[in-house]
Amino acid sequence: MSHRPTVHGVNASPFVRKVRVAMLEKGLEYDLEPVMPIGVSDEFKKLSPLGKIPVYQDGDFVLPDSSCIIAYLERIHPEPALYPADDEEFGHALFFEEFADTRLVDHLTTVFFQRIVRSKIMKQEPDEALVEHSLTELIPPLFDFLEKKVSDADGIVGGRFSIADIGIGSPFVNFNHAGESVDAGRWPMLANYLQRILSRPSFKSLIEEEMAAFAAM
Ligand SMILES: N[C@@H](CCC(=O)N[C@@H](CS)C(=O)NCC(=O)O)C(=O)O
Protein backbone atom coordinates (compact mmCIF):
# COMPACT_ATOMS: atom_id res chain seq x y z
CA MET A 1 0.00 0.00 0.00
CA SER A 2 1.79 3.13 -1.17
CA HIS A 3 -0.68 5.76 0.06
CA ARG A 4 -1.61 6.61 3.62
CA PRO A 5 -5.07 6.00 4.99
CA THR A 6 -7.00 8.83 6.63
CA VAL A 7 -8.47 8.90 10.13
CA HIS A 8 -11.30 11.41 10.40
CA GLY A 9 -11.80 12.94 13.84
CA VAL A 10 -10.34 15.19 16.51
CA ASN A 11 -7.49 14.22 18.78
CA ALA A 12 -9.32 14.80 22.09
CA SER A 13 -11.93 12.12 21.35
CA PRO A 14 -11.25 8.97 23.40
CA PHE A 15 -12.43 6.88 20.43
CA VAL A 16 -10.20 8.63 17.91
CA ARG A 17 -7.32 8.25 20.37
CA LYS A 18 -7.95 4.49 20.56
CA VAL A 19 -7.47 4.18 16.79
CA ARG A 20 -4.41 6.42 16.77
CA VAL A 21 -2.79 4.46 19.62
CA ALA A 22 -3.49 1.17 17.83
CA MET A 23 -1.96 2.53 14.61
CA LEU A 24 1.11 3.80 16.46
CA GLU A 25 1.52 0.46 18.22
CA LYS A 26 1.39 -1.25 14.83
CA GLY A 27 3.69 1.31 13.20
CA LEU A 28 1.04 2.41 10.68
CA GLU A 29 1.16 5.87 9.14
CA TYR A 30 -2.00 7.85 8.47
CA ASP A 31 -3.28 11.38 7.97
CA LEU A 32 -5.60 12.88 10.58
CA GLU A 33 -8.47 14.81 8.99
CA PRO A 34 -9.98 17.04 11.68
CA VAL A 35 -13.74 16.57 12.12
CA MET A 36 -15.56 18.01 15.13
CA PRO A 37 -18.34 15.64 16.17
CA ILE A 38 -20.93 18.42 16.52
CA GLY A 39 -23.40 19.19 13.73
CA VAL A 40 -21.49 17.09 11.20
CA SER A 41 -22.13 17.67 7.49
CA ASP A 42 -24.31 15.47 5.27
CA GLU A 43 -21.11 14.68 3.40
CA PHE A 44 -19.53 13.30 6.58
CA LYS A 45 -22.69 11.28 7.35
CA LYS A 46 -22.08 9.43 4.08
CA LEU A 47 -18.84 8.18 5.67
CA SER A 48 -20.28 7.77 9.16
CA PRO A 49 -23.96 6.80 9.18
CA LEU A 50 -24.16 7.46 12.94
CA GLY A 51 -22.48 10.84 12.49
CA LYS A 52 -19.71 9.87 14.89
CA ILE A 53 -15.92 10.02 14.86
CA PRO A 54 -13.60 8.23 14.20
CA VAL A 55 -13.88 7.08 10.60
CA TYR A 56 -11.07 5.21 8.83
CA GLN A 57 -10.74 5.72 5.09
CA ASP A 58 -8.40 3.96 2.73
CA GLY A 59 -9.33 4.79 -0.85
CA ASP A 60 -12.86 3.52 -1.40
CA PHE A 61 -12.81 1.56 1.84
CA VAL A 62 -14.57 3.47 4.61
CA LEU A 63 -15.11 2.17 8.13
CA PRO A 64 -16.53 4.01 11.16
CA ASP A 65 -16.30 3.00 14.83
CA SER A 66 -13.08 2.61 16.82
CA SER A 67 -13.75 -1.02 17.78
CA CYS A 68 -14.52 -2.02 14.18
CA ILE A 69 -11.52 -0.10 12.84
CA ILE A 70 -9.02 -1.66 15.25
CA ALA A 71 -10.40 -5.17 14.70
CA TYR A 72 -10.05 -4.58 10.95
CA LEU A 73 -6.50 -3.25 11.31
CA GLU A 74 -5.59 -6.37 13.28
CA ARG A 75 -6.69 -8.49 10.29
CA ILE A 76 -4.63 -6.58 7.73
CA HIS A 77 -1.64 -5.88 10.01
CA PRO A 78 -1.57 -8.74 12.52
CA GLU A 79 1.73 -7.72 14.15
CA PRO A 80 2.17 -6.72 16.86
CA ALA A 81 -1.03 -8.40 17.97
CA LEU A 82 -3.43 -6.20 19.90
CA TYR A 83 -5.85 -9.03 20.70
CA PRO A 84 -4.93 -11.99 22.91
CA ALA A 85 -4.37 -15.31 21.12
CA ASP A 86 -6.05 -17.28 23.90
CA ASP A 87 -9.81 -17.61 23.35
CA GLU A 88 -10.91 -16.73 26.88
CA GLU A 89 -8.47 -13.84 27.13
CA PHE A 90 -9.74 -12.60 23.77
CA GLY A 91 -13.27 -12.56 25.16
CA HIS A 92 -12.18 -10.76 28.32
CA ALA A 93 -10.22 -8.16 26.34
CA LEU A 94 -13.31 -7.37 24.25
CA PHE A 95 -15.34 -6.97 27.43
CA PHE A 96 -12.83 -4.54 28.97
CA GLU A 97 -12.89 -2.55 25.72
CA GLU A 98 -16.69 -2.41 25.94
CA PHE A 99 -16.61 -1.48 29.65
CA ALA A 100 -14.21 1.35 28.81
CA ASP A 101 -16.07 2.56 25.70
CA THR A 102 -19.32 2.85 27.64
CA ARG A 103 -19.22 3.40 31.40
CA LEU A 104 -15.66 4.73 31.71
CA VAL A 105 -16.00 7.09 28.73
CA ASP A 106 -19.43 8.29 29.97
CA HIS A 107 -18.22 9.30 33.41
CA LEU A 108 -14.59 10.28 32.80
CA THR A 109 -15.47 12.44 29.82
CA THR A 110 -18.25 14.19 31.75
CA VAL A 111 -15.46 15.77 33.77
CA PHE A 112 -13.51 16.53 30.56
CA PHE A 113 -16.57 17.95 28.81
CA GLN A 114 -17.37 20.35 31.64
CA ARG A 115 -13.84 21.49 32.40
CA ILE A 116 -12.37 21.60 28.88
CA VAL A 117 -15.03 21.56 26.16
CA ARG A 118 -17.60 23.71 27.97
CA SER A 119 -15.11 25.99 29.61
CA LYS A 120 -12.37 26.38 26.98
CA ILE A 121 -14.25 25.79 23.73
CA MET A 122 -17.85 26.84 24.42
CA LYS A 123 -16.70 29.60 26.82
CA GLN A 124 -19.38 28.68 29.35
CA GLU A 125 -19.11 28.06 33.08
CA PRO A 126 -18.47 24.37 33.82
CA ASP A 127 -21.17 22.60 35.84
CA GLU A 128 -18.96 21.77 38.84
CA ALA A 129 -21.91 20.14 40.69
CA LEU A 130 -22.15 17.61 37.89
CA VAL A 131 -18.38 17.10 37.98
CA GLU A 132 -18.53 16.60 41.76
CA HIS A 133 -21.32 14.04 41.44
CA SER A 134 -19.28 12.13 38.85
CA LEU A 135 -16.11 12.28 40.96
CA THR A 136 -17.71 11.22 44.23
CA GLU A 137 -20.59 8.92 43.19
CA LEU A 138 -20.27 7.58 39.66
CA ILE A 139 -16.54 7.14 39.13
CA PRO A 140 -15.32 5.45 42.37
CA PRO A 141 -17.20 2.16 41.76
CA LEU A 142 -15.56 1.93 38.32
CA PHE A 143 -12.13 2.45 39.87
CA ASP A 144 -12.93 -0.14 42.58
CA PHE A 145 -13.72 -2.65 39.83
CA LEU A 146 -10.52 -1.94 37.88
CA GLU A 147 -8.38 -1.92 41.03
CA LYS A 148 -9.25 -5.61 41.53
CA LYS A 149 -8.53 -6.51 37.90
CA VAL A 150 -5.15 -4.90 37.20
CA SER A 151 -1.79 -6.30 38.26
CA ASP A 152 1.85 -5.33 37.91
CA ALA A 153 1.87 -6.73 34.38
CA ASP A 154 1.96 -4.79 31.10
CA GLY A 155 -1.70 -5.41 30.38
CA ILE A 156 -4.96 -6.06 32.23
CA VAL A 157 -5.66 -9.28 30.30
CA GLY A 158 -3.15 -12.12 30.26
CA GLY A 159 -0.37 -9.81 31.43
CA ARG A 160 0.17 -8.39 27.93
CA PHE A 161 -0.74 -5.03 26.39
CA SER A 162 -3.90 -5.39 24.30
CA ILE A 163 -7.02 -3.69 23.01
CA ALA A 164 -8.29 -3.82 26.61
CA ASP A 165 -5.53 -1.44 27.73
CA ILE A 166 -6.03 0.85 24.73
CA GLY A 167 -9.72 1.09 25.58
CA ILE A 168 -9.17 1.66 29.30
CA GLY A 169 -6.23 4.04 28.93
CA SER A 170 -7.89 6.36 26.43
CA PRO A 171 -10.63 7.99 28.56
CA PHE A 172 -8.15 8.41 31.42
CA VAL A 173 -6.23 10.78 29.14
CA ASN A 174 -9.35 12.97 29.03
CA PHE A 175 -9.68 12.68 32.80
CA ASN A 176 -6.09 13.87 33.22
CA HIS A 177 -6.59 16.72 30.74
CA ALA A 178 -9.46 17.84 32.99
CA GLY A 179 -7.04 18.18 35.91
CA GLU A 180 -7.97 14.91 37.63
CA SER A 181 -6.00 11.77 38.33
CA VAL A 182 -6.56 8.47 40.07
CA ASP A 183 -5.91 8.78 43.80
CA ALA A 184 -2.92 6.44 44.29
CA GLY A 185 -3.68 6.22 48.02
CA ARG A 186 -7.13 4.76 47.40
CA TRP A 187 -6.49 2.87 44.14
CA PRO A 188 -2.73 2.11 44.12
CA MET A 189 -2.81 -0.76 41.61
CA LEU A 190 -4.92 1.22 39.14
CA ALA A 191 -2.78 4.35 39.46
CA ASN A 192 0.33 2.28 38.86
CA TYR A 193 -1.19 0.46 35.90
CA LEU A 194 -2.27 3.71 34.25
CA GLN A 195 1.13 5.22 34.77
CA ARG A 196 2.62 2.28 32.82
CA ILE A 197 0.01 2.27 30.05
CA LEU A 198 -0.04 6.01 29.45
CA SER A 199 3.75 6.28 29.38
CA ARG A 200 4.02 3.90 26.43
CA PRO A 201 5.44 5.81 23.42
CA SER A 202 2.09 5.52 21.59
CA PHE A 203 -0.03 7.12 24.31
CA LYS A 204 2.73 9.48 25.40
CA SER A 205 3.19 11.07 21.96
CA LEU A 206 -0.54 11.74 21.62
CA ILE A 207 -0.84 13.11 25.15
CA GLU A 208 1.98 15.56 24.40
CA GLU A 209 0.34 16.60 21.13
CA GLU A 210 -3.01 17.13 22.87
CA MET A 211 -1.51 19.06 25.78
CA ALA A 212 0.22 21.41 23.34
CA ALA A 213 -3.10 21.94 21.54
CA PHE A 214 -4.97 22.72 24.78
CA ALA A 215 -2.20 25.06 25.94
CA ALA A 216 -2.58 27.04 22.71
CA MET A 217 -6.33 27.58 23.31
N1 LIG B 1 -18.76 3.41 19.34
C1 LIG B 1 -18.15 4.54 18.67
C2 LIG B 1 -18.37 5.80 19.53
C3 LIG B 1 -17.86 7.04 18.83
C4 LIG B 1 -18.36 8.32 19.50
O1 LIG B 1 -19.31 8.32 20.29
N2 LIG B 1 -17.70 9.43 19.17
C5 LIG B 1 -18.14 10.71 19.67
C6 LIG B 1 -16.96 11.65 19.89
S1 LIG B 1 -15.97 11.20 21.24
C7 LIG B 1 -19.03 11.34 18.62
O2 LIG B 1 -18.71 11.33 17.45
N3 LIG B 1 -20.15 11.90 19.05
C8 LIG B 1 -21.05 12.60 18.18
C9 LIG B 1 -22.43 12.07 18.27
O3 LIG B 1 -22.69 11.13 19.04
O4 LIG B 1 -23.29 12.60 17.56
C10 LIG B 1 -16.67 4.27 18.47
O5 LIG B 1 -16.11 3.42 19.17
O6 LIG B 1 -16.06 4.85 17.57
Image (tube, rainbow, N blue to C red):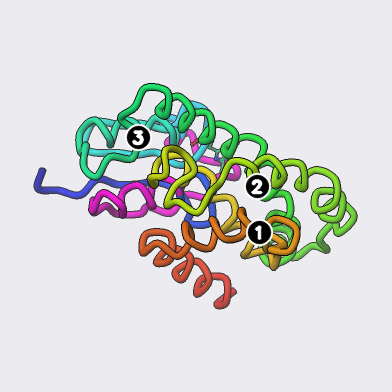
Q: Residue furthest bottom?
A: 216
Picture coordinates of residue 148 (x, y %)? 64, 42
**What's the residue type where badge 2 is placed?**
Glu
**Which numbered mark, 1 or 3, is in the foreground of this view?**
1
Question: Does the magenta run of residues contain 25?
Answer: yes
Q: Residue furthest front?
A: 152
Name the residue tied to disc 1: 188
Query: Which residue lies at the image location 55% right of the left edge and 57% below the top edge?
Result: 194
**Which numbered mark, 3 or 2, is in the foreground of this view?**
2
Task: Say if mark 1 contacts mark 2, CB within 8 Å.
Answer: yes
Label count reads: 3
Residue 18: mark: none
Circle 3 Cα neighbour tier, 10 Å, few/some/many (<14 / 14–19 / ≥20):
many
Picture coordinates of residue 85 (x, y %)? 30, 30
Please tell me which of labels 1 and 3 falls first in the chain.
Answer: 3
Q: Nearer the viewer, residue 25 or 213?
A: 25
Image quadrant where one finds the N terminus? top left
- In screen coordinates, is 130 left or right of 142? right
Q: Secondary structure at mark 2?
A: helix
Task: Specify the segment rendered in magenta.
Answer: 18-44
Q: Which image quadrant shows ligand 1? A: top right
**What's the residue type where badge 1 is placed?**
Pro
Please tell me which of labels 3 and 2 falls first in the chain.
Answer: 3
Question: Does the magenta run of residues contain 207?
Answer: no
Task: Say if mark 1 contacts mark 3, CB within 8 Å.
Answer: no
- In screen coordinates, is 91 left or right of 201? right
Name the residue tied to disc 3: 83
Please tell me which of labels 1 and 2 falls first in the chain.
Answer: 2
Name the residue tied to disc 2: 147
Query: Which residue lies at the image location 76% right of the left edge and 46% below the top edge?
Result: 139
Q: Nearer the viewer, residue 141 or 58?
A: 141
